[in-house]
Image (cartoon, rainbow, N blue to C red):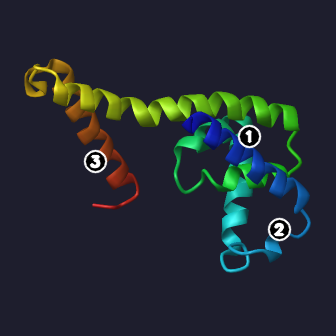
Amino acid sequence: MRIFQAYFLMLLVFFIGLSLKKSIHKIWPFTKYPNLLNQGKSFFKKYGILGLFIGKFIGPVRPLLPITAGTLDMEIRKFFLIEIFSCFIWALVYTIPGYYAAQTMVSEINPFNSFSFWISLVVLFVLIRYFSKKYKML
């Protein structure tokens, strides 16, 4: 269900961008934050189709990419195909960890005795440290 919701929402935003491409900068939130549209355009121009797919997993960029793709006249067929695939992957990536966490809670297996639990914990720690230093968060 989440796949279809995400897909149709992104299609709606794409068509809004397509229909308002000349006046999109006059509509909120772009009137208050004009750099949002510029950031979306520069991200889209820099990374292209791959950026549209990867942008699905980057929270602040996710809502800007479909509207930017619409304002930049991206081919509708390409957008549909990329969105179908990325929505499917996005839904899996965001729901599978919760599923396995719940399975671990109801099973008799102690997750702390699992090798994959400790590997996941180390990978998570390394990623947090890497991005915190890269973006100077910590």
Q: Tag 3: residue type?
A: Arg
Dot 1 amino acid type? Gly
Please state, as top left, top right, bottom left or bottom right, where the C terminus lies in the image.
Answer: bottom left
The reply to whether the C-beta atoms of the residues labelled 1 and 3 are less than 8 Å apart is no
Q: Where is residue 34 in the image (x, y as percent from the top left)?
A: 71, 74
Residue 59 placement (x, y as % from top left): 52, 52
In front: label 2 or label 1: 2
Measure how far apart labels 2 and 1 are at the Cα level.
20 Å
x 81%, y 32%: residue: 78
Q: Please, is residue 50 above or below residue 69 in the view?
A: above
Mark with earlier residue (1, 3): 1
Image point 39% across, 29% down: which residue?
Answer: 96
Helix, strand or loop for disc 3? helix
Residue 48 is tagged as 1
Camera-side residue of 6 and 58: 6
Q: In which quarter of the image is residue 50?
A: top right
Residue named by callout 3: 129
Rendered residue at 53%/42% (across/down):
57
Q: Which residue is nearer to you in this view: 97 or 78?
A: 97
Q: Mark 2 points at which residue?
A: 24
